[in-house]
Image (cartoon, rainbow, N blue to C red):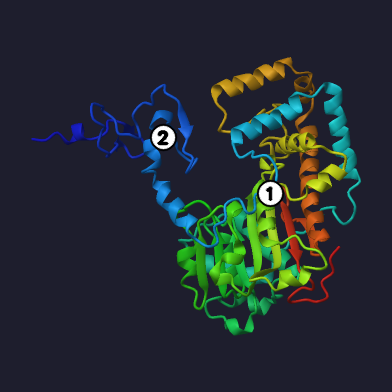
């Protein structure tokens, strides 16, 4: 009689209350997923950094990596153009290296230099004009009552109230800005599946960093959409795509590509089509790359060329977040930072300080040095050694959590003000608002802009 137990990996899965069902490796009791890793050097796969491989096996791995087929297929697409939205500057794409560099931008300073930087940040923030000052704008449109009705019918849809409130306020601000049709109470009970789309002239929608696509799902349920393009570099389960495809006359396309490499003008389905660009929590440089992807840097002479492009932007709403991941290479408005009297190193320091704004416990006096999962034990020990030898480390430890949070939020405001000014300089009507209260999410900045007058309200006033 065959012992089935011996043909299985001997790793016990407590959540499933059984052994792993995979076959063990030769001369081992465990499968490849659960065998103990050797002491040889493991490195990130260059095709897909989400997994690692032994360095001496790298050459063989690259010939059979599951991401290879995806990369080869993507390279043949007309809209793939490596690094088209990357921006200029030295490559800083290694997260751990960038984090190490930013940390040194803080802790290599003398105490007077660090205190001078904090004073400069506070002075710049205090001098922000009304054009760049961030106002509260928590808007829940009547049209989004459709979602509550739909939730009562379809309980299979993932639902968390805080996410729906964020998504609804993004749409509410688009409506307030004249980029979505105004909705009345009577419109709020209309199911999007029975809506006569010929009466609703919503442009195509491109969602950047779409994830599972639930921001677009809410938009499709509450307003008329004829064409949707979801841009996301990762593969997700439980996507909204299946539900979206059930909506009559809605054309849906998902592009699995990094925003950095996307030439939107070469996407066939967007040829000659005006579109709205949306994104909820575009981490760090993803916001800058999205802006570059959507908007050609233009002057008065080539403004007309922008409108005649194969596809053209009508408006955008991008919820920014994770400013600590921003990089000088990608940042869209370097001149703004330099004109403030700040340097590239000061920018790195500011991005590091933004992490103070979203500390999980502002009532705690514990200073979290670095929460990056990419740091090795040796690197973490090195950070501790730097802090113990750095006078700046002592200054930071003596700051209360609230003091650190205030400085962090100031840095976030300044970084987003630069993005706002870049849009204004290109002639777009733009503003940054706090689209939800911090109790819903401390990452609550929404960058919103439009070309010319609003599509649905020519009287929209922009500060």
* Residue at x 47% of width, y 43% of height: 47
Q: Are marks 1 and 2 in contact (CB under 8 Å)?
A: no
For disc 2, the neighbor class at 10 Å (few under 14, some 14 to 19, many from 20) is some
Give left or right: position of 7 versus 304: left
Mark 1 or mark 2, earlier in chain: 2
Q: Secondary structure at mark 1?
A: loop
Q: Secondary structure at mark 2?
A: helix
Q: Is residue 73 above or below residue 23?
A: below
Of residues 75 and 453, the one drawn nearer to the viewer in this rendering: 75
* Residue at x 53% of width, y 68% of height: 150
Which quadrant does the C terminus fall into?
Answer: bottom right
* Residue at x 64% of width, y 51% of height: 282
Is residue 382 visible in the rendered image? The answer is yes
Q: Which residue is mark 2?
A: 58
Q: Is residue 193 above or below residue 349?
A: below
* Residue at x 69% of width, y 26% of height: 366
Give left or right: position of 109 versus 216: right
Q: Which residue is mark 1?
A: 87
Q: Is residue 28 above or below residue 1?
A: above
The image position of residue 28, as x and y in percent, is: 26, 27
Of residues 199 and 308, the one drawn nearer to the viewer in this rendering: 308
């Amino acid at each position: 009689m065959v012992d089935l137990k011996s043909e299985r990996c001997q790793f016990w899965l407590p959540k499933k209350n059984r052994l792993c069902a995979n076959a063990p490796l030769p001369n081992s009791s465990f499968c490849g997923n659960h065998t103990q890793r050797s002491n040889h050097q493991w490195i990130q796969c260059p095709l897909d950094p989400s997994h690692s491989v032994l360095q001496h096996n790298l050459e063989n791995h690259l010939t059979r990596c599951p991401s290879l087929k995806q990369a080869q297929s993507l390279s043949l697409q007309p809209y793939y153009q490596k690094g088209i939205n990357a921006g200029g500057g030295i490559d800083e794409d290694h997260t751990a290296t960038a984090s190490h560099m930013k940390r040194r931008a803080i802790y290599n300073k003398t105490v007077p230099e660090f205190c001078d930087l904090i004073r400069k940040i506070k002075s710049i923030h205090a001098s922000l004009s009304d054009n760049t000052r961030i106002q509260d704008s928590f808007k829940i449109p009547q049209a989004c009552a459709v979602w509550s009705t739909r939730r009562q019918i379809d309980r299979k849809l993932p639902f968390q109230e805080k996410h729906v409130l964020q998504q609804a306020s993004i749409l509410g601000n688009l409506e307030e800005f004249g980029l979505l049709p105004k909705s009345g109470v009577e419109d709020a009970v209309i199911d999007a599946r029975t809506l006569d789309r010929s009466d609703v002239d919503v442009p195509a929608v491109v969602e950047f960093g779409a994830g599972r696509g639930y921001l677009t799902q809410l938009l499709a349920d509450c307003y008329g959409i004829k064409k949707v393009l979801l841009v996301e570099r990762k593969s997700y389960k439980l996507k909204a795509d299946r539900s979206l495809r059930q909506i009559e006359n809605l054309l849906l396309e998902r592009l699995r590509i990094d925003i950095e490499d996307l030439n939107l003008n070469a996407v066939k389905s967007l040829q000659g089509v005006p579109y709205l660009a949306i994104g909820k929590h575009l981490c760090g440089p993803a916001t800058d790359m999205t802006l570059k992807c959507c908007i050609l840097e233009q002057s008065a002479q080539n403004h007309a060329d922008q409108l005649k492009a194969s596809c053209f932007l009508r408006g955008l709403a991008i919820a920014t977040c994770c400013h600590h991941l921003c990089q000088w290479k990608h940042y869209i408005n370097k001149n703004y930072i330099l004109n403030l009297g700040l340097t590239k190193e000061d920018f790195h320091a500011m991005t590091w300080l933004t992490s103070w704004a979203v500390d999980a416990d502002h009532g705690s006096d514990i200073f979290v040095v670095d929460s990056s999962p990419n740091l090795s034990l040796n690197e973490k020990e090195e950070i501790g050694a730097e802090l113990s030898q750095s006078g700046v480390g002592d200054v930071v430890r003596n700051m209360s959590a609230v003091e650190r949070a205030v400085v962090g939020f100031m840095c976030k405001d300044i970084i987003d003000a630069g993005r706002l000014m870049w849009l204004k300089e290109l002639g777009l009507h733009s503003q940054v608002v706090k689209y939800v209260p911090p109790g819903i999410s401390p990452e609550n900045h929404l960058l919103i802009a439009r070309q010319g007058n609003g599509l649905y309200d020519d009287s929209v006033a922009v500060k």
